[in-house]
Image: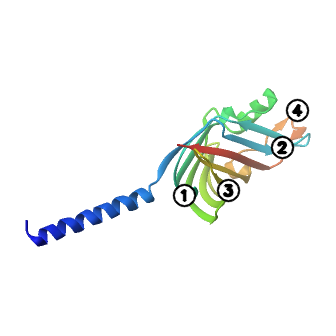
Amino acid sequence: MTKMKTNTLKLLAVVTAFLGISTFATAQKSYTLDSKSTFSVAGTSTLHDWEMKSASGTGTASLNIANGKLTDIEALTVTLLAESVKSEKKSMDKVAYETLKTDKNKNIKYVLKSAEKVNETTWELTGTYTIAGVSKVYKTSVKTTVTKDGLNLQGSNKITFTDFGMKSPTAMLGTIKTGQDLTIKFNLNFNL
């Protein structure tokens, strides 16, 4: 083998090794939403404040965690069965499902569009919520905590019924009315 070929092979080996190390150092890993994740929606009415909860979401995230720190959120999707969201009253659940149009729209969904790091524990997420068949983009500030198994994300969004083409529910022949404003809260655990 000539000296030039030997040097070329050595250079290729060094470049390949370097690229392999670089790829490993910044590799995105796929994480799955675990069953301890929780979701809630809270609002008001002329009778009392109310909250509906669910722990039945599914989802995945493509994350880069290096040296115990979150360095990138490449993708994140969460799907929630709309009728898994429940209150303490079946009559309220029924009205909520009519409002959410669950006969035609079985799922509530969130899909990340972009993520920007604010500091070590805060990220600004831009993503699309699809509720009652209507999609709308929101910015969400989330608190992030790297865990031994992956990542915890906590945050909330203020939305309104009209944002998603829904009518504010009423009960008791219209004598009880819900307020327009809602707060969606989430506590998500993504694990390997």
Amino acid on which the number 3 mark rests in the picture: Val
Report crowding for label 1: few under 14, some 14 to 19, many 20 or more residues within 10 A (C-alpha): few
Residue under circle 4? 172
The structure residue drawn at horizontal position 66% and vertical position 60%, both measured from the top left corner, is 122
Quadrant in which the N terminus is drawn: bottom left
The structure residue drawn at horizontal position 65% and vertical position 45%, both measured from the top left corner, is 188
Please tell me whether mark 1 or mark 2 is closer to you in this view: 1
Residue 165 located left or right of residue 8? right
The structure residue drawn at horizontal position 55% and vertical position 50%, both measured from the top left corner, is 76
Residue under circle 1? 67
Amino acid on which the number 1 mark rests in the picture: Asn
How far is disc 1 from disc 2 in space, using C-alphas?
47 Å
Q: Are marks 4 and 2 in contact (CB under 8 Å)?
A: no
Q: Are marks 1 and 4 in contact (CB under 8 Å)?
A: no
Among the two numbered marks 3 and 4 on one chain, the one whose residue lies closer to the N terminus: 3
Residue under circle 2? 178
Q: Secondary structure at mark 2?
A: loop
Please tell me whether mark 3 or mark 4 is closer to you in this view: 3
- When asked about the image quadrant of residue 187, the answer is top right
How far is disc 1 from disc 4 in space, using C-alphas?
56 Å
Amino acid on which the number 2 mark rests in the picture: Thr
Please tell me whether mark 3 or mark 2 is closer to you in this view: 3
